[in-house]
Amino acid sequence: MAGAILRRGPDDHGVWVDPECSVALAHRRLSIIDLSPAGHQPMVSESGRLVITFNGEIYNYAELRGELERTGSAPAWRGRSDTEVLLSAIAAWGVRPTLERAVGMFAFGLWDRRERTLVLARDRLGEKPLYYGWSGRTFVFGSELSALTALPGWRGEIDRGALSLLLRLNYIPAPHTIYKGIAKLAPGTFLTLAAGQREGHIETYWDAAQIADRGSRNSFRGTPEEAVERTDALLRQSLKGQMIADVPLGAFLSGGIDSSTIVALMQALSPHPVRTFSIGFNEAGYDEAPQARAVARHLGTDHTELYVTMDDAMAVVPQLPSLYSEPFADVSQIPTAIVSRLARRDVTVALTGDGGDELFSGYTRYHLADRLRPWLSRLPASLRQASSDFARHVSPQAWDRLVGGPARLLPERLRPPQHIGDKIHKASHVIRHGSAPDIYRALVSLWQHPEDAVIGGTEPAIPLTDGSSARSFAEPMRHMMYLDLVGYLPDDILVKVDRASMAVGLEARVPMLDHRLVEFTWSLPLDLLRRDGQSKWLLRQVLDRYVPHALIERPKMGFGVPLDSWLRGGLRDWAENLLDPRRLAEEGLFHPEVIRAAWQAHLDGNRNLQYQLWSVLMFQAWNEARGAGSSQQ
């Protein structure tokens, strides 16, 4: 099982077994703090009572160590690793008090030999993964599903409800996984399972809903200037902890607001040029390298840039099922894998700018949904329904002719985007709804009705679809931000970064997600996050202190690839094999006629269904690799 995740920890390995209780813990180590054998895991406490296997970093481990020493609770230290500090803190204070004190990203399994209990815990925002469940009579857990599936006798049954969620969202949200009976531990929680029990007890030690509620009740009362100063100070506090490493450290730099802010502050805190990394494409509309280069030059970083051909990028696609041991279909996984590989040549730790959109209200969809809601809510439901039906009754290609043809006479800046018909069909699902939660769900859903494509695919309820959390938010935009904080961020963004980086033995750290900064941003009024139609206003003010406004101010590009043309070109044969109608029928998971109709419409150029098809293709590729692995075993 540990060998299955060798890439996550290539530097050391260990196994600890308690034959009396039939308990075994294994660990693969990526050495970051204290590279000596004193950091070896699984690690046993000084008393011999506790044993831990720990993934991640405790950024305030020095402060915790000092507190243990001041209170006389410190052991005779064997080394200076954060693992030993965490284990000693749990021995002295208990699990929950330690988790509430710890600042970091982590997942761990802890066996208490005296109480005969296993504790699984995960960090507050979900930066590090933790899967668990039963395989027959054996309770298993691990950082990736590949560790669980290596267990002898493994019988994994596909969860069709989870597959439906994959088609809706391009990811599978916690606590669900692609396998029945296997779950993801939710961020900010820990599970306790006693020997002889079948069901564990889950407790929450950091609750995003409570943080949001507390922030609204104790709103920031200071001036905008004071908010900028406080944000700057909290980011610096986060970075001081996250820049600690006994190995080379650098950062991803796209030239956008989030990564540029992180790099600017890193450089302000560092006496030496910070190592920064970016990739570029020769294709217009996908190349962020010039902006990253300009920011790096201004800040004086030691910058590495790699231009990638589309053939290079497409070559990553066959590797994705092994990188992501659970089906995952955010197409920016491809450039993320490439930039991770680039950075790993020179550093072992890389900081990222992820989290800025969720904390500082950066996504365009927040503004769009907020603008649409009052207008749509005033329309009678019958009129919304009729408008939606009419928009969908006209085919996308007909809309392209109706709107796109005359638009060619307009100046380029006023022309609608390509495939306007697809966007009108997307909008047809949005305008059916009058409430903010329904509008937002329609905006972020790829397959609006996944059950039409997945045989027996009844979706389980999640915060995005059940609407229950909306009652807690007076401001619809805050509710959207909350849904992303507990869903899209941990289950898409952080999954993408963790798997792509750990696949090459690179530790990615996310300074924006220091929980103290997260809690502060939830106390801020929305007009400090969005002002005069500008998103991430507050973060922009921080960045303006370090980087000229002109270097940053550009349209948001994202981290994408031209998947639509790839599927009609270089990836067509690969996709055709995975979507073969006989194969789909034999596997019995998808309705072949629905999938084939979508595929044909995309190939004909009548519709751009790249993202809907990508979710199906990523599942098919993962399922194929899973079958191949089983036959080899």
Image: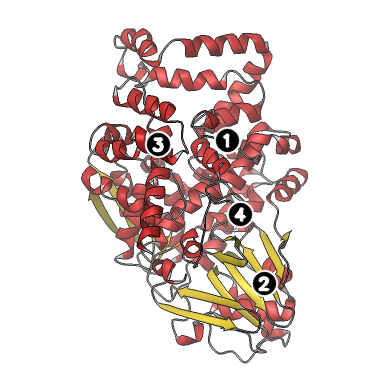
Residue type beneath disc 3: Leu
Q: Residue at x 23, y 38 (%)?
A: 570
Q: Secondary structure at mark 3?
A: helix
Tell me the number on the disc at residue 584: 3
Find out whether the residues at labels 4 and 1 contact each other: C-beta distance under 8 Å: no
**Image height check: is 14 above or below 290?**
below
Labels 3, 1: front one: 3
Q: Nearer the viewer, residue 628 or 217?
A: 628
Q: Of label 4 and label 2, which has the lower sequence position?
A: 2
Residue type beneath disc 1: Arg
Q: Nearer the viewer, residue 564 or 262?
A: 564
Task: Name, please, the residue furthest toward the right.
Answer: 217
Residue type beneath disc 4: Gly
Tell me the number on the disc at residue 530: 1
Left or right, 377 with respect to 150, comes to right
Residue type beneath disc 2: Leu
Can you identify the residue that label 2 sits on?
A: 118
Q: Residue at x 60, y 18 (%)?
A: 432
Q: Of label 3 and label 1, which has the lower sequence position?
A: 1
Labels 3, 4: front one: 3
Q: Of label 3 and label 4, which has the lower sequence position?
A: 4
Labels 1, 2: front one: 2
Left or right, 46 with respect to 623, comes to right
Left or right, 627 with respect to 364, comes to left
Tell me the number on the disc at residue 181: 4
Alpha carbons under labels 2 and 3: distance apart: 41 Å
Q: Secondary structure at mark 4?
A: loop
Left or right, 290 with respect to 547, comes to left
